[in-house]
Image (cartoon, helix red, strand yellow):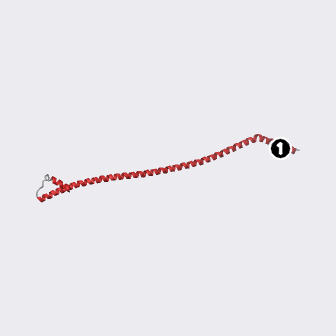
Amino acid sequence: MYLNATLLAQITVFIILALFTMKYVWPPIVKALDERAAKISEGLAEAERGRQSLALAAKHSAETMREGKEKVADMIAQAEKRADQIIEEAKVQARIEAEKVVAAAKSEIEQEAARMRESLRGRVADLAVAGAEKILRREVDAKAHAEMLAAIKQDL
């Protein structure tokens, strides 16, 4: 009998312990486990949102970089175009200046040639007078023959 009474006492203590555990110990453990599971699922959801946000940020960053590269390429193309335009304008200005210099040089040459012609006319007239003087063996009056000398200059 002692075995039955001991077994009956052990079963009674086990049932009391099980009821006590189910009523007072088990609910806080289940609640803690549920809270932990909720935190874990919330953390996983936050991680997924973070991953999506990172992917979106990477995509946005790539798009911004592409736009920046396009803007830089456009700016470089505009700068090269403006440089070519400036070079062309400089060439036109250089041609205009060269034409002005050439025109001024031609004008100066023509003036110098006219002065030389006048000088030669005068010298030829003086030589003609000297030659005529030698031929006639007398001195010619330059004032008296000024009209004749002017006519000779015009003919030359």
Q: Is residue 126 left or right of residue 81?
A: left
Q: Quadrant of residue 154?
A: bottom left
From the top left corner, tell me how far across and down residue 79 is, in percent.
45, 50
Asked whether the viewer can see residue 106, the reply is yes
Residue identified by numbered label 1:
11
Residue 109, located in which quarter of the rendered image? bottom left
Q: Residue furthest bottom?
A: 135
Residue 142 relative to residue 30: left or right: left
User: Which one is nearer the viewer's eye here, 72 or 114?
Assistant: 114
* Residue nearer the viewer, 105 or 56: 105
Rendered residue at 79%/42% (across/down): 18
Image-quadrant location for residue 152: bottom left
Q: Amino acid at mark 1?
A: Ile
- Residue 100 is situated, as x and y percent measured from the top left of the image, at 32, 52
Mark 1: few/some/many CA within 10 Å (<14, 14-19, 20+)? few
Residue at 85% from the left image edge and 43% from the top image edge: 8
SS at mark 1 in the image: helix
* Residue under the point 74% across and 41% down: 27
Residue 101 lies left or right of residue 27; in this view the side is: left
Residue positioned 47% across, 51% down in the render? 77
Whole-percent x and y of residue 126?
A: 17, 56
Count of numbered tags: 1
Say if residue 122 shows up in the picture.
no
Q: Quadrant of the C terminus?
A: bottom left
In the rendered image of this protein, does residue 143 appear above or below residue 9?
below
Across and down, in percent, residue 81 comes to 44, 51
Q: Residue furthest top?
A: 24
Image quadrant containing the N terminus:
top right
Q: Which of the two residues, 82 or 46, is positioned nearer the viewer here?
A: 82
